[in-house]
Amino acid sequence: MNMKTTVSVIIPYFHGSRFLHQLLQMMEDNAESLKSEHDAALEVLLVNDSPDEIIKVSDDGHFSLKML
């Protein structure tokens, strides 16, 4: 049985909407590098610590994105 490696990154989010696009682009770049260099997948867990702020992002990148 051949199991694929997954790298999980947990990111706390607190009123960071101005940095969100840059963060997601960085995660996209890292996901592509992981896949090409190590045949590994990237999973990003974004923890919303801003209860009054709704985070809207598309999940169409090369990594798994989960909002908590």
Image (cartoon, rainbow, N blue to C red):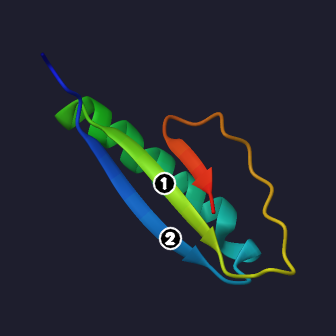
Circle 2 residues within 10 Å: few <14, some 14–19, many ≥20? few
Query: Is 52 on the left-hand or right-hand side of 34?
Result: right
Query: Is 57 on the left-hand or right-hand side of 44?
Result: right
Circle 1 residues within 10 Å: few <14, some 14–19, many ≥20? some
Q: Is residue 66 above or below residue 35?
A: below
Q: CA distance from mark 2 to mark 1?
A: 7 Å
Residue at (67%, 66%) from the top-left corner?
A: 20
Task: Give the residue type at disc 1.
Answer: Val
Counting residues from the N terminus, which is met first, the one under dot 2 or under dot 1?
2
The percent coordinates of residue 49 (x first, y second) are: 67, 81
The percent coordinates of residue 32 (x first, y second) are: 38, 37
Residue 39 location, quadrant: top left
Residue at (84%, 75%) from the top-left corner?
A: 53
Q: Secondary structure at mark 1?
A: strand
Give 28 or 52, whichever is nearer the viewer.
52
Give 53 or 23, whichever is nearer the viewer.
53
| Residue named by callout 1 | 44
Residue at (27%, 30%) from the top-left corner?
A: 36
The percent coordinates of residue 21 (x first, y second) are: 67, 60
Q: Residue furthest left?
A: 1
The percent coordinates of residue 63 (x first, y second) are: 49, 40
Quadrant including the C terminus: bottom right
What is the total number of numbered labels drawn onto the structure image?
Answer: 2
Q: Is residue 8 above or below residue 40?
A: below
Task: Give the residue type at disc 2.
Answer: Ile
| Residue named by callout 2 | 11
Quadrant including the N terminus: top left
